[in-house]
Amino acid sequence: MAQRRTPFGDRARYWFDSTLARGAAALVGWMALLSLAVVVPASAVMVWTDPDAPPSLAERLAEVWRLTGETLRLGGATGTPLRAMLSVLLALVTLLYVSTLVGLITTALTERLTSLRRGRSTVLEQGHAVVLGWSEQVFTVVSELVAANVNQRGAAVVVLADRDKTVMEESLGTKVGSCGGTRLICRSGPTTDPAVLPLTSPATAGVVLVLPPDEPHADAEVVKTLLALRAALAGAKPRPPVVAAVRDDRYRLAACLAAGPDGVVLESDTVTARLIVQAARRPGISLVHRELLDFAGDEFYLISEPALTGRPFGEVLLSYSTTSVVGLMRGGTPLLNPPPTTPVAPDDLLVVITGDDDTARLDDCAESVEKAAVASRPPTPAPAERILLLGWNRRAPLVVDQLHRRARPGSAVDVVAEPGEATIREISEAEADSGNGENGGNGGNGLSLALHHGDITRPETLRRLDVHSYDSVIVLGRDPAPGQPPDDPDNRTLVTLLLLRQLEEATGRELPVVTELIDDRNRALAPIGPGADVIISGKLIGLLMSQISQNRHLAAVFEELFSAEGAGVRLRPATDYLLPGSTTSFATVVAAARRRGECAIGYRDHADASTRPHYGVRINPPKRERRRWTAEDEVVVIGTD
């Protein structure tokens, strides 16, 4: 068989590429040949076409050499061969010197720009916020810090993570958007290295926030970061307050010890599990928490009001027209929703919800209460409930524990998960941890658990379940697995929600669904009905950390607010407080809630429950505001179950 002949153009290109591969010398040689191939003929044409050119050939060649030398900066001197060679030598030395100088300057500038691009320069700021670590919470934290600094000049937020600086800046710019007057500075490096942390100038920072990374051993990383921060701040006085978060409560003690006496450490998984269970019993509660914790609306503040000293707490509730009083801070201990007869002590601070720290002004609203509109019937006791738990992750045992704490006799939880996600042993351990193990899976409060294996992203799995027979459906996403895309759990959750939505449309009956998502951007994609609720697992912790970073004294208030036994945020039917169809002021709702031992702080309008962005939630409305209350409306209160 005859060998196919390679085209001349391909062989020439291959030979040229092979010479270039020999290094810088070959490249310089080709550049010299190419330059001479262009300059020498062009110089010859200029000489031969010049009317004043010398007549002899030797003189014309010398002129060509002079033009070539001037063009290529190679001297171009004429005369004896020695003189010409020395001219070329001096020109080459000059060219080498200038080229080397330009190369050194270019290299130095490139190294400096590369260093700046890598985020390895020290930040010189005062009173700035330092965020250590990278996770989905970083976008919430940075957004809230920017919102908190909207009225401050020269504010700065510094983010340090073991990621590329440019990638961090692009991600924050995409998800956070405009930072207004707040400067956003990113630095790259491991947060567990005490030698790297000084890049953020933590000693001069106003607050340091430590985020748990999206990794299996995130809590150990948080503890190590706190230890590195303590080493980096050795000898610094005063030290900035530290706010950190861990997922597993087993790491909280170690994190608290590493953070120091002024540090605040939150348990993200426990708080998320409590919120999921609250939302399962009353969808919409996550919207209330979001309104309370972000800096866009009314927030928690601690204020002093000497004029109210000695008055009972029940009277204080109606002492402000545009501020909601929810408790007292006594000696550093929060008393949320204390008994109405509790007197206000001289050193007490009021825990209030208001627009700003200077908007709480005394304005008695007792005259706006209309007693004729107050409902007199007692609230309906909660019956036994059936809950369907679709999916299993690390927070699932905590969810089961929270369900157990508030379960009514005869309540049941059915768990549906793939064999690799949940096992009989894990379910049994969840029952034992929640106190159900003593009576064969049917504890003293009557909560029973059952495991069913199945893929919750398959239509046949959901069709086998009588989903409409359950009082609430909880959808949990998988734990992010190493090597998988970070949005994989949300992708599966969205598929499950789509199948549940199809069942709703097929039967015409609404499902009370509560779902957990990782990325807040997927909330808009979730195919859910108006009676459903979405819990963004990392967003709530990010909001809490941001609030505490601006006022660390609120940490005790939030600890009480989200504790299992303390007074928390609740959504109640409006008919528990007012006669259906009555038109009355919000002050009447506050007075009705006071009779039940609760603090009313807002409401949810059923007519706007599907309208963005607040979905009908109104926090801290003016107490003299009058509206018509329907049987489907809900009242937001601070109280206990």
Image (tube, rainbow, N blue to C red):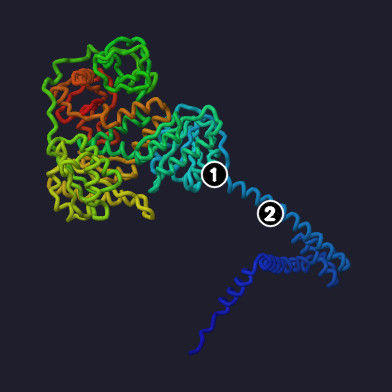
**Residue closer to the observer: 437 or 117:** 437
- Decide if residue 326 is in sight here: yes
Q: Residue furthest right?
A: 80
Q: Residues within 10 Å of mark 2 (few under 14, many from 20)?
A: few
For the residues labelled 2 and 1, the Cα–Cα distance comes to 24 Å
Q: Earlier in the sequence, mark 2 or mark 1?
A: 2
Mark 2: amino acid: Gly
The residue under label 1 is 119
Q: Which type of secondary structure does the marked residue at label 2 adopt?
A: helix
Label tally? 2
- Residue 330, image x, y percentages: 35, 18
Q: Residue furthest front?
A: 438
Answer with the quarter of the image where residue 93 lies.
bottom right
- Residue 119, image x, y percentages: 54, 44
Answer with the quarter of the image where residue 81 lies.
bottom right
- Decide if residue 528 is in sight here: no
- Residue 166, image x, y percentages: 50, 47
- Residue 306, image x, y percentages: 36, 11
- Mark seen at residue 524: none
Mark 1: amino acid: Gly
The residue under label 2 is 103
